[in-house]
Image (cartoon, rainbow, N blue to C red):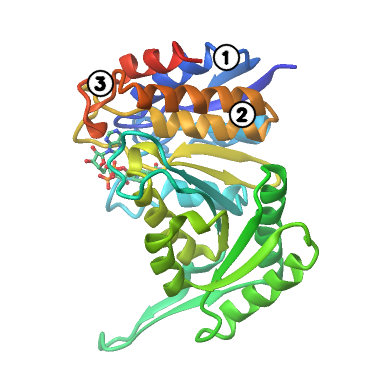
Amino acid sequence: MTQKITVIRGDGIGPEIMDATLFVLGKLDTGFEYEDADAGLVALEKHGDLMPASTLESIARNKIALKSPLTTPVGGGFTSINVSLRRHFDLYANVRPAVSFPNTKSRFGDGVDLITVRENTEGAYLAEGQEVSADGETAFSGTRITRKGSERIVRYAFELARSTGRKKVTAVHKANIIKSTSGLFLAVAREVAAKYPDIEFQEMIVDNCCMQLVMRPEQFDVIVTTNLFGDIISDLCAGLVGGLGLAPGANIGENAAIFEAVHGTAPDIAGQGKANPCALLLAAAQMLDHVGQVENAERLRKAIVATLEAKDSLTGDLGGTGNTMGFAQAIASRL
Ligand code: NAI
Ligand code: MG
């Protein structure tokens, strides 16, 4: 059966890394058909809209999108396109693997292999009811946590652990201090954990977790946490494995899933063939897993590792002198 994928080529280095990614995917027997849809600055210029209705319809129809980074213009009152996509499709799980790769600038050796599962729709990140007093002396921002939101994200983390053969889920919280919201999250995490006796459950306070991640990252397997903690921890984890050029992410909901690189549009190197395509390629591997093409996902990841190992055609961010498409060709040749 053919699977249609909405492809958003995006801004800055977006089109370059998307070309490279689709080139490599073209060498795998995926049965994918691609439907181009515009978003970001390019869509604003073409259609007068950062996120045209036709793009939302394409994602709603196909349920899966592969997305390059987008520019949200600063000023002019635009909401972040990524945040509005998450809201529109209720993409409640932000899933970010961090795996050590050879020959990167990571100082943490080869022991990191973890996935952060971040709640993507509620918590402190929404900053509800933000207010600054008239005299500018006091500011307020609300945090809302729900049983439903906590339950579905923790369940997602345990299901992910089970389906990928992982052994442990760590719930990260600050329930000792923020007893209401973080307390509810932790209480629900314990309830859900009880239903998965085959997976080890661990609780960790967020500040200790940050220290542990740096001291002994290899102890972690799946981390599940609320929105703002997850935002911070997942960037910390990208740093553990050598930075943004190798960090993919998925935004997953019941009715749609969007796969992307974690990095932005890199305007400083756009249009020069200098961009590392690996983050989007690794996002494509997550997408292959998501649609059940686990073998293709594994082939793709192994080809990336082998190319890094051989230091073949690496881009500048990895210390090489290669270009985006040359790197992609080197990966494709190892599939
Ligand atoms: P950025 O991630 O675009 O760039 C940070 C640094 O990393 C730059 O030096 C860049 O050259 C380098 N870099 C990023 N990706 C790279 C790659 N694949 N290969 C080699 N080097 C790479 O972050 P920045 O500069 O903060 O944001 C630039 C723009 O991207 C902004 O307009 C921002 O709004 C947008 N952005 C979009 C995101 C998305 O759509 N998911 C996420 C983050 C930022
Ligand atoms: Mg972030």
Q: Quadrant of ligand 1?
A: top left
Q: Which residue is mark 2?
A: 288
Q: Quadrant of the N terminus?
A: top right
Residue found 20% across the figure and 22% down from its top: 321
Instruction: Assign a secondary structure to mark 3.
Output: loop
User: Does residue 90 appear in this view?
Assistant: yes
Q: Earlier in the sequence, mark 3 or mark 2?
A: 3
How far across and down, in percent of the image, does residue 45 sit?
34, 31
For label 3, the residue is 273
SS category of the residue bearing label 1: loop
Task: Using the image, determine if residue 207 lies above or below residue 156.
Answer: below
Q: Which residue is mark 1?
A: 28
- Around disc 3, counting alpha carbons within 10 Å, would you say few (fewer than 14), some (14 to 19), or many (20 or more)? some
Q: Position of residue 255 (x, y in %)?
A: 69, 42
Q: Secondary structure under badge 2?
A: helix
Q: Which is more N-terminal, label 2 or label 1?
A: 1
Going from N to C along the chain, the mark reached first, 1 or 3, is 1
Nearest to viewer (mark 3 / mark 2): 2
Contact (Cβ within 8 Å) of mark 1 with mark 2: yes
Foreground mark, 1 or 3, reads 1
Q: Three-letter amino acid code at disc 3?
A: Gly
Tell me residue 147's x, y (percent): 70, 71
Q: CA distance from mark 1 to mark 2?
A: 11 Å
Looking at the picture, how far across and down is residue 232, in whole percent? 40, 61
Q: Inspect the image, locate mark 2, and give the three-letter code of the amino acid beneath it.
A: Leu
Q: Decide: few, some or many residues near mark 1? Use Cα within 10 Å; few <14, some 14-19, many ≥20.
A: some
What's the amino acid at mark 1? Leu
Ligand 1 under 8 Å from disc 1 Cβ: no
